[in-house]
């Protein structure tokens, strides 16, 4: 399926085939359908009862996909007012009550919010190269047996505290699902 510019489809769950709209911006590239399909196969199609954090929410493709598949709550964080506006419109259109929108820098959010999540989606703008700075902040926000999904355009290795559960590559996109190994 061809992605329509500024639009992407939810591929599973209660809002399957519903269209999300988002502002066009060079740093905003929604996770492609086939990658989302793989990630939600890894996570399981039914996310009932799980809590999710979508840092750098952008188009909201990952967060709305999780909510569509039954996540109890999805916190979407984005610093860009245009993205938040589009996310709010999509939330209202879908009547996505489990979705909470937070307009804030991802680092400020992680340093000021003490909630923990079953799944953290980490898909920052590729050119920002934030992985090494943000990964140390994630364990305190991850529930025991939780996962971090990370997406980038280059090879990226985790440190020994993280175990790669699954990984794949699609074109120039490298993505992986990781578990934190040092929970106390």
Image (cartoon, grey):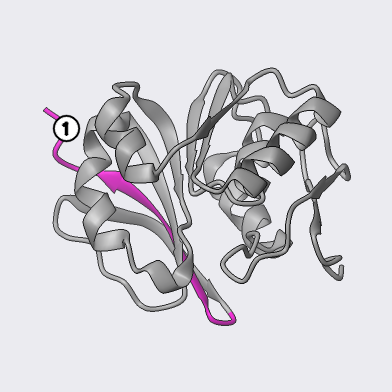
Q: Quadrant of the C terminus?
A: top left
Q: Nearest the camera: 132 or 143?
A: 132
**Relative image position of residue 165 (x, y in whole percent):** 37, 53
What count of labels does the image hold?
1
Q: Residue furthest front?
A: 81
Magenta span includes 143: no
Q: Is residue 183 magenta?
A: yes
Q: Is residue 64 above or below residue 26?
A: above
133 vs 43, nearest the viewer: 133
Magenta region: which residues? Answer: 171-184
Q: Residue at x 22, y 31 (%)?
A: 140
Vertical side of 36 occupied by 144: above or below = above
| Residue 159: percent from left, percent from top | 17, 60
SS for callout 1: loop
Q: Nearer the viewer, residue 5 or 141?
A: 5
Instruction: Give the quarter of the image for residue 146.
Output: top left
From the image, tell me which residue sits under label 1: 183
Vertical relation: 4 (above or below) 38: below
Q: Residue at (48%, 56%) from the top-left corner? A: 123
How crowded is the residue under tag 1: few (<14 C-alpha within 10 Å), some, or many (20+)? few
Q: In the rendering, at what x and y percent does residue 50 appear? A: 51, 24
Residue 18, above or below 184: below
| Residue located 53% across and 42% down the image | 43
Question: Residue at 40% of width from left, 43% of height from top?
Answer: 105
Residue 143 in picture, x, y percent from top left: 32, 27
30 sits to left or right of 112: right
State the residue in front, 154 or 28.
28
């Amino acid at each position: 399926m061809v992605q329509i510019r500024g639009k992407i489809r939810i591929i599973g769950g209660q809002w399957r085939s519903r269209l999300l709209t988002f502002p066009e911006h060079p740093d905003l590239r929604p996770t492609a359908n086939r990658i989302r399909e793989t990630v939600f196969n890894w996570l399981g199609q039914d996310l009932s009862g799980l809590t999710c954090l979508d840092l750098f929410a952008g188009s909201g493709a990952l967060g709305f996909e999780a909510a569509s598949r039954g996540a109890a709550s999805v916190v979407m964080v984005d610093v860009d007012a245009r993205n938040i506006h589009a996310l709010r419109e999509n939330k209202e259109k879908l009547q996505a009550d489990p979705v909470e929108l937070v307009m804030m820098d991802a680092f400020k959010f992680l340093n000021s919010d003490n909630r923990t999540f079953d799944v953290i989606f980490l898909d920052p703008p590729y050119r920002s190269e934030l992985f090494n700075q943000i990964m140390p902040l994630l364990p305190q926000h991850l529930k025991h047996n939780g996962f971090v999904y990370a997406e980038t355009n280059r090879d990226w290795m985790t440190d020994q505290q993280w175990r790669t559960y699954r990984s794949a590559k699609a074109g120039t996109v490298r993505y992986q699902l990781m578990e934190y190994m040092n929970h106390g």
